[in-house]
Image (spheres, rainbow, N blue to C red):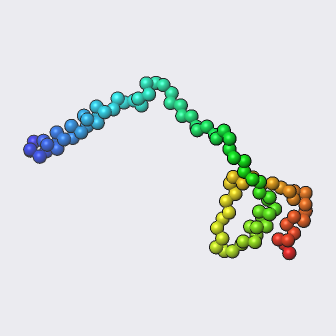
Amino acid sequence: MSHSKFRQALFLVTVLSTLAGCSDGGNNNNGAAIVVTPPLPDPDPEPQPQTDFSTFVIGLFANTADNTDPVPVNGLDFSFADQDNPAAFDELLE
């Protein structure tokens, strides 16, 4: 075996034995179950003001340009004051 091949083989054996020595072949939890608990919710969340649904929708229709950004609705608490009003959105259809 040439000198450079011997060095390559020695290097490979050294690297492999180092990697094998760093691993115990397990997941290092000694058989115990790993339990991940989710974070607790905020105990006193601030109440969100209610948004009137009819006013919100009419406002959306007033801003209907082609370059308008989407309006975020996650986290909004809608109230439905016009739930029994069949004419609530008549102004949109005029």
Q: Quadrant of the N terminus?
A: top left
Q: How many marks?
A: 0
Which of the 4 image quadrants contains residue 53? Answer: bottom right
In terms of depth relative to the viewer, which is nearer, 76 or 1? 76
Residue 10 drawn at (x, y percent) = 16, 39
Is 8 left or right of 38, judged from the image as shown? left
Does residue 57 sit above or below 75 in this rendering? below
Which of the 4 image quadrants contains residue 73? Answer: bottom right
Taking the spot 44% from the left edge, 28% from the top edge, the residue there is: 29
Does residue 60 sit above or below 18 in this rendering? below
In terms of depth relative to the viewer, which is nearer, 28 or 64? 64
Residue 71 drawn at (x, y percent) = 68, 63
Outermost residue, top side: 31
Taking the spot 9% from the left edge, 44% from the top edge, the residue there is: 3
Is 7 left or right of 87, judged from the image as shown? left
In terms of depth relative to the viewer, which is nearer, 71 or 20? 71
Does residue 32 sit above or below 50 in this rendering? above
Residue 92 drawn at (x, y percent) = 82, 71
In terms of depth relative to the viewer, which is nearer, 30 or 4? 30
Residue 94 drawn at (x, y percent) = 86, 75
